[in-house]
Amino acid sequence: MKRSKVDVLVIGAGPAGTVAASIVNKAGYKVRIVEKLKFPRFVIGESLLPRCMEALEEAGFLDAVKAANFQEKFGAKFVKDGVICDYMFAERFTEGWTWTWQVQRAQFDKILADTVETMGVPISYETAVTGIVFNGSDSVTTVEDKNGEKEEIEARFIIDGSGYGRVIPSLFNMDKPSNLPPRKAVLAHTKDVNRSMSDEPNRITIIVHEYGVWIWVIPFSNGITSVGYVGDPEFFEKFPGTPEEQFRSLIASQPYLAERFKDTELVFEPRALQSWSKTTDKFYGDGFVLTGNVTEFLDPVFSSGVTLATVSSQIAAKLVLKKLNGEEVNWDEEYTKVMMQGVNTFRSYVMHWYDGTLDTIFFADDQDPEIKRRICSVLAGYVWDLENVYVKNHDTALTKLASTIQTRDKFRALNKQP
């Protein structure tokens, strides 16, 4: 059997894996990526957040991504029963990037992977991890390529950015269910010939369809638009037929979209994704660290996936460098605690999106500009800024704000009575 040796083995060539690989490679260590699939490949997570730009910049990817002319994204637009709430990233509370991109992930991920290869990091595509043996921090990983050829890769450390593949959690029985209810998404890419009806390509639109059901509309720079419905699996049972018939019935059921996307040409047959939320017992171990969606994927509503993937890899890669340099690393404090701050902040917002708390806040009259700026920072991905009360107290601040708004509205209604 073939045998090779590296300083760091990275599992997964998505944004998490490539960001980590680039940062470690820049420090002069020998890095290799193994990826189970062949690129380009389809994946959701098409609307990025400004915070991930910092990770992409440190990894050296920005120039290559800019050259692709992806659709620039300046904010998020929420719609309910014709009422619109805008959050523009330039108005956020936290210092940082004011824009990002909306991307077709197959192309975006391949750009990152191709760029890291030009930096000297080899990627073995269509190569699956079949086993890992740890000896302290050192490890031997067995992989198998599409031709059945096996190889053992010795590494001083492993960074697992395998996303939905969840390689190390699966191999070592670390998976556990998320506390978020299972949900389903039905999505397609459309040829958006009627985009001028809304003329808002530079932001994501999120539409409240009914309680617990929402729609994303993500325009790309090439005239294609991603449209997806998310809700409880039972909701979709009301729309029978083929995947295309179901998707077109869903479009017809939403007044905000029905005319714009009536009879639109679909780029591919609508796809369904379901029960994506998972987590794990711990984010690290002796000889490995988990990054990206392999730690926990929450929900697509606030586009947190790529941000958590790239930022976790940005942080993890620097800690791996400390470890390789012989320095002590407190993984609980320096990694798990930091990442859980971001994950839990997004989790609170996801839960309050589905329970209606954010409905009350987003569509309230006379919104406080300062409060809106602080919430905007969260929507921009700045979920580690503890100077922001809506980050620091994410578990209580939103419910208190919604309660204040409801009390105010009741008082106003009473005063209007004859």
Image (cartoon, rainbow, N blue to C red):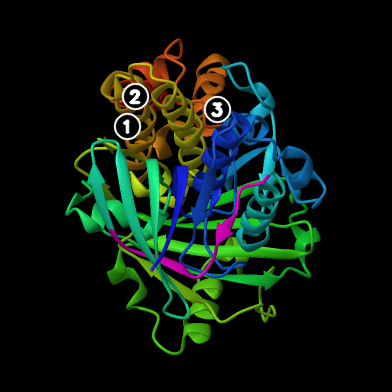
Given this view, does label 1 or label 2 mark the residue nearer the observer? 1
At 53% from the left and 54% from the top, the residue drawn is 13
Instruction: Please name the amino acid that badge 3 sits on.
Output: Cys
Task: Identify residue type, mark 1.
Answer: Asn
**Residue 126 falls inside the magenta stretch:** yes
**Circle 3 residue:** 376
Against 364, is 209 above or below?
below
Q: Quadrant of residue 327?
A: top left
Dots 1 and 3: beta carbons under 8 Å? no
Q: Position of residue 380 (x, y in %)?
A: 56, 32
Callout 1: helix, strand or loop? helix
Q: Position of residue 161 (x, y in %)?
A: 43, 48
Residue 394 numbered tag: 2
Q: Classify 369 as above or below 167.
A: above
Give, as a single range, the part of the protein colored magenta.
Answer: 120-131
For disc 1, the marked residue is 344
Q: Distance from label 1 to label 2 (Cα)?
A: 8 Å
Which class describes the residues within 10 Å of circle 1: few (<14), some (14-19), or many (20+)?
some
Q: Disc 3 or 2, which lies upstream in sequence?
A: 3
